[in-house]
Amino acid sequence: MSEIRKVGVVGAGLMGSGIAQVSAAAGYETIVREIATGPLEAGLTAIRRSLDRARGEGEDDGQGEG
């Protein structure tokens, strides 16, 4: 059996964007297909927000900005 290196996701809704994010974070080349730009942009926005939240959780060192 061959190794999985690429993941294709059909649809960028709630489930599709989540699958795409997890797949990409795990190191797989990830391709998302969506038939309309509106849902695609919404899915990308959801992924960006999720990544921003995840980054923000580990950044606070308690020392402030200056």
Image (spheres, helix red, strand yellow):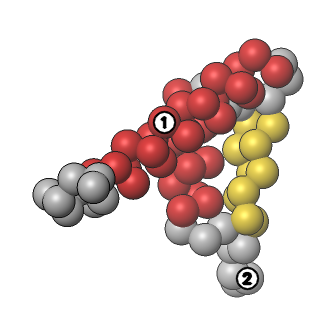
* Within-10-Å neighbours for mark 2: few <14, some 14–19, many 20+: few
**Foreground pick, 59 / 10:** 59
Picture coordinates of residue 63, whole percent (x, y)? 17, 59
Picture coordinates of residue 2, whole percent (x, y)? 73, 82
In front: label 2 or label 1? 1
Q: Which residue occupies 83% across, 19% down?
A: 36
- Residue tagged 2: 2
Considering only vertical position in the picture, is 22 above or below 1?
Answer: above
Q: Count all numbered tags in the image, as a single digit.
A: 2
Picture coordinates of residue 49, whole percent (x, y)? 48, 36
Asked which quadrant contains residue 11, the reply is top right
Asked which quadrant contains residue 4, the reply is bottom right
Local secondary structure at mark 1: helix
Local secondary structure at mark 2: loop
* Residue type for callout 1: Arg
* Residue type for callout 2: Ser
In the picture, measured across the screen, residue 60 lies left or right of residue 34, that is left
Picture coordinates of residue 7, whole percent (x, y)? 71, 58
Q: Which is more N-terminal, label 1 or label 2?
A: 2
Q: The C terminus is located in which quarter?
A: bottom left
Q: Which residue occupies 55% across, 40% down?
A: 48
Asked which quadrant contains residue 27, the reply is bottom right
Q: Residue furthest left?
A: 62
Considering only vertical position in the picture, is 45 above or below 2?
Answer: above
In the picture, measured across the screen, residue 27 lies left or right of residue 29, that is left
Q: Which residue occupies 56% across, 50% down?
A: 21
* Within-10-Å neighbours for mark 1: few <14, some 14–19, many 20+: few
Q: Which label sits on residue 49?
A: 1
